Amino acid sequence: MKERVYLDFNASAPSKPEVIEAVGAAMVAGGNASSVHARGRQARRAVEEARARIAKLVNCRPGEVIFTSCGTESNNLALKGAKVTAIAVSAIEHDSTLAAAQASGTPWLLLPVDEVGLLKMEALEEVVAKTQPPFLVSVMLANNETGVLQPIAQIAEKVHQKGGLLHTDAIQAAGKVPVDFAALGADMLSLSAHKIGGPQGVGALIVREGVELQPRMVGGGQELRRRSGTENVPGIVGFGRAAELALDDVEGRARLATLRDALEKSVAGMSPHSTFFSQPVARLPNTANFTMPGVDGSTQVMAFDLEGIGISSGAACASGKVASPRVQMAMGATEEVAGAAIRVSLGPTTQKADIDRLLAAWQRLWERTQSSRQAAAAGQE
């Protein structure tokens, strides 16, 4: 039996061996980072070392790193904790950001994107010009489905000129492209460990010094009183190790871009009418989002799974949930075209042979569907 091929790294990147080793060592060491005895102090040192590593990954101060349970919590803390008059989020944000805006109790609205998935700057300018500050704008650095990269520094400048705050979800970007919190100019930035080969169940929110944030979890006052609760020391240690490894993997990004481009070129050769989302603009080097015309994305996912290949048809937002194609539709695609999209996301372990297997499976499925259509058309004559 052939080994399975995993091409869904944007959903979750498998934990790296070095991370697993670090997590195991932290579990053996034990200790509560809030305790003042020797074992507690040891746990605290481990947490602070991890905090420094994550700060280095995104070029921020260690004191600006607030640990959370996941990226979803980070997005919720940013949108629900900010003391603002209104919230504006882009139409292609992750479900956790959209849901947090809706549940914030603050007036909120959607900012449109263009046909390649970039935020429409004129719409942003119109909104910030007429909104009473302080307001909050949330725009993700890299989209989890198309990989499109937003000009966050430019957005931050426009937001700040009108007295607003900017939050950016950098969960998909970290480890795949350079992320510089200081240069981006954002006030808050979300991260998640398992997207960079760290453990699941740990994330971080980077909060610029001076930004007021109301905690969503209260109790012992951990994480500078912004997120109470016993720190997940093994998870945080694993996150720190994953951040350290991600920072050093510059050559790997270029390799993945080469594999991704070859994949898209081959698909276009087999199916000239396939749509490739966000292809003409800057995007993550590991992400391809394209259609098999007339074949539902969920059907493709199941067919490839039977071939031993793991991909997705959208964001992995909830267990067992087939995501709606709202991101592609926000870019102007029809429901039919958007529904035929799949996401292929590569990772450090992806090899050319994996791409070749996907392409062979893709061609078989495409030829079967074409034959079925031709037979159906002949039967109607």
Image (tube, helix red, strand yellow):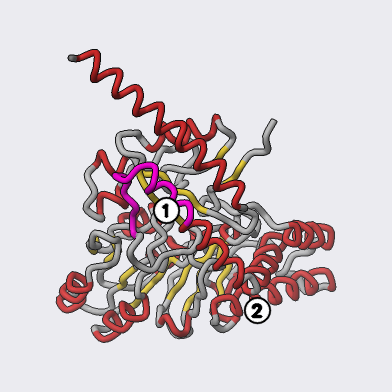
The foreground one among 181 and 357 is: 357
Q: Is residue 118 left or right of residue 312?
A: left
Q: Nearer the viewer, mark 2 or mark 1?
A: 1
At a point 52% along the width and 75% down the height, the residue shown is 178
Vertical arrangement, residue 26 with respect to residue 223, above or below: above
Q: Position of residue 380 (x, y in %)?
A: 20, 14
Q: Amino acid at mark 1?
A: Lys
At a point 26% along the width and 72% down the height, the residue shown is 85
Give the residue number, with chain letter if any, for mark 2.
52
Where are the magenta residues, as a range?
262-278
Q: Does residue 72 show up?
A: no
Q: Is residue 260 left or right of residue 252?
A: left
Q: Amino acid at mark 2?
A: Ala
Crowding near the residue tagged with mark 2, few <14, some 14–19, many ≥20 C-alpha atoms within 10 Å:
many
Identify the secondary structure beneath mark 2: helix
The foreground one among 247 and 96 is: 247
Does the magenta-highlighted stretch encompass residue 31?
no
Q: Is residue 339 left or right of residue 47?
A: left
Give the residue number, with chain letter if any, for mark 1.
265
Q: Quadrant of residue 44?
A: bottom right
